């Protein structure tokens, strides 16, 4: 646990982690962003918060919760 | 130099070499000891060596960090909003408060949706955990817990149990029953034990395993039945404030963010820290995986939210505005990933266009800081919890 470790131990831990990370495989931002955009574009037409849901299908809109007194 | 002239208040055997000589009162690691001047000199030299090692470690760390930055920058040819220039601008959003859930006596600290898309669980500073039906505003269960500040709560994937934890340093699982008269607090089972407060909890794909993050700087994976620690994750150098599991069915990674300004991605099976991102300027309050699983967002006290791409291993977007000066405490994505909802300490929820980096709209309504926002599992609504002791459902 970090608060129990001395500064030296914390630095050693960070150092080992950095050594591992320098060699992680990476792909260019261009390609990844294009992928992300394609993903979003594919799903966006079905996103209820963006395109809205017709009032009769939306359980939150409309006057639910009222009662009819006869 | 007359540094050898000193007031010898005591004369006797030195604590380290046992030779009788004038002793100097010094403090080593907060303990008073008496060393003769020769031993003090030797120790000072050793201290220097230790200092040197600390220095050389720091230097090595800095060089590695620079190298990491270079490697990452090599692939940084373009920013997300530039690639997204051709994307259509979002039409005006019509999101409004549809439900206000009142019932907590004090600040609501956390909330989570059930997979059935209508139930929510929320936990509060007053020690109560309440399960609501968001359609009808009915309170289905209310569990009083012995500790205050229940900082984390989560719904099990089956909908049959909830987990909650906070200042009691534990995370407990409570099975929900249909019988209204049953005393749920009695069936509470402590699963996770940490040495400091539990800041976040989440069930994995099943009801059987629980992942928790804690103020003691670690995250841990527990078996619910036996309470056994399956894996622990060390690497943060300060409190861990939030965690989120990768969305895929076979997902075995999760991301955590903490007060050391770092967001770390972990492999659940090996306990290894796979990737680490340090670009925030203050505590990271919340991390959330992107629906595609290849990216995640973080919300921080530095008033920005940032978007990190895991395959490119770098930050690709920053969501900030000069007019926003209060920290963001929570964030969540809409179903498609086009919108990022972020709750801030200035009582508002800002809705960001993830691709273009601009703010789409602001949601006003809460009367105190927003502690948690969560989009419902089918994406039809946004639930928000706030320190004004209410929860709101927006749709």
Image (cartoon, coloured by chain):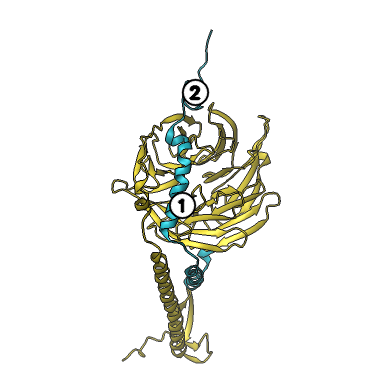
Chain colours: A cyan, B yellow
Mark number displayed over residue A56:
2
* Residue shown at the point (71%, 52%) measured from the top left: B226
> Looking at the rendering, which quadrant does residue B164 occupy?
top right
Element under label 2? loop
Between tags 1 and 2, which lies in front? 1
The answer to whether residue B29 is above or below residue B372 is: below
Mark number displayed over residue B192:
none
Q: Quadrant of the N terminus of chain B?
A: bottom left
Callout 1: 10 Å neighbours few (<14), some, many (20+)?
A: some
Between residue B363 and residue B198, name the one nearer to us: B363
**Residue B344: % across, % down:** 39, 44
Callout 2: 10 Å neighbours few (<14), some, many (20+)?
A: few
Measured in 3D between alpha carbons, the distance from the residue under mark 1 to the one under mark 2, in whole angstroms, is: 35 Å
Mark number displayed over residue A35:
1
Query: Is tag 1's residue or tag 2's residue first in the polypeptide sequence?
Result: 1
1 and 2 marks in contact (CB < 8 Å): no
* Residue shown at the point (43%, 81%) measured from the top left: B52
Q: Looking at this rendering, what residue extends furthest in the top direction?
A: A70
């Amino acid at each position: 646990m970090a608060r129990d470790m001395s500064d030296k131990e914390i630095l050693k831990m960070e150092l080992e982690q950095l050594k591992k990370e320098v060699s992680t495989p990476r792909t260019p931002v261009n390609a990844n962003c294009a992928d992300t955009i394609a993903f979003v574009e594919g799903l966006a037409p079905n996103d209820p918060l963006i395109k809205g849901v017709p009032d009769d299908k939306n359980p939150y809109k409309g006057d639910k919760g009222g009662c009819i007194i006869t | 130099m007359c540094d050898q002239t000193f007031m010898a208040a005591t004369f006797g055997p030195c604590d380290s070499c046992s030779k009788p000589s004038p002793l100097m009162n010094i403090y080593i690691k907060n303990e008073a000891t008496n060393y003769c001047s020769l031993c003090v000199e030797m120790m000072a030299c050793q201290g220097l060596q230790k200092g040197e090692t600390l220095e050389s470690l720091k230097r090595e760390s800095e060089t590695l960090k620079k190298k990491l930055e270079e490697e990452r920058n090599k692939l940084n040819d373009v920013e997300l909003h530039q690639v997204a220039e051709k994307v259509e601008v979002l039409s005006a959003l019509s999101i409004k408060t549809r439900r206000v859930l009142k019932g907590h006596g004090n600040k609501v600290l956390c909330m989570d949706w059930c997979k059935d898309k209508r139930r929510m669980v929320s936990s509060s500073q007053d020690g109560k955990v309440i399960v609501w039906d968001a359609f009808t505003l009915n309170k289905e269960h209310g569990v009083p817990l012995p500790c205050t500040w229940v900082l984390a709560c989560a719904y099990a994937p089956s909908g049959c149990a909830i987990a909650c934890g906070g200042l009691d340093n534990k995370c407990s699982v409570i099975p929900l029953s249909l019988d209204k008269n049953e005393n749920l607090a009695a069936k509470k089972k402590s699963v996770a034990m940490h040495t400091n407060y539990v800041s976040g909890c989440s069930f994995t794909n099943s009801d059987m395993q629980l992942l928790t993050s804690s103020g003691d700087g670690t995250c841990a994976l527990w078996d619910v039945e036996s309470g056994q620690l399956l894996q622990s994750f060390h690497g943060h150098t300060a409190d861990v404030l939030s965690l989120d599991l990768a969305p895929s069915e076979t997902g075995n990674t999760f991301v955590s963010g903490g007060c050391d300004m770092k967001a770390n991605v972990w492999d659940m099976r090996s306990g290894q820290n796979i990737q680490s991102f340090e670009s925030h300027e203050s505590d990271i309050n919340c991390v959330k995986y992107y629906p595609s699983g290849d990216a995640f967002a973080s919300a921080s006290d530095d008033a920005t939210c940032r978007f990190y791409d895991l395959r490119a291993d770098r930050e690709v977007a920053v969501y900030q505005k000069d007019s926003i000066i209060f920290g963001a405490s929570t964030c969540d994505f809409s179903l498609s990933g086009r919108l990022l909802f972020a709750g801030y300490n200035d009582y508002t929820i800002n809705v960001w266009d993830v691709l273009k980096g601009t703010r789409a709209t602001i949601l006003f309504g809460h009367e105190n800081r927003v502690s948690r926002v969560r989009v419902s599992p089918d994406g039809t609504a946004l639930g928000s919890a706030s320190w004004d002791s209410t929860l709101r459902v927006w749709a």
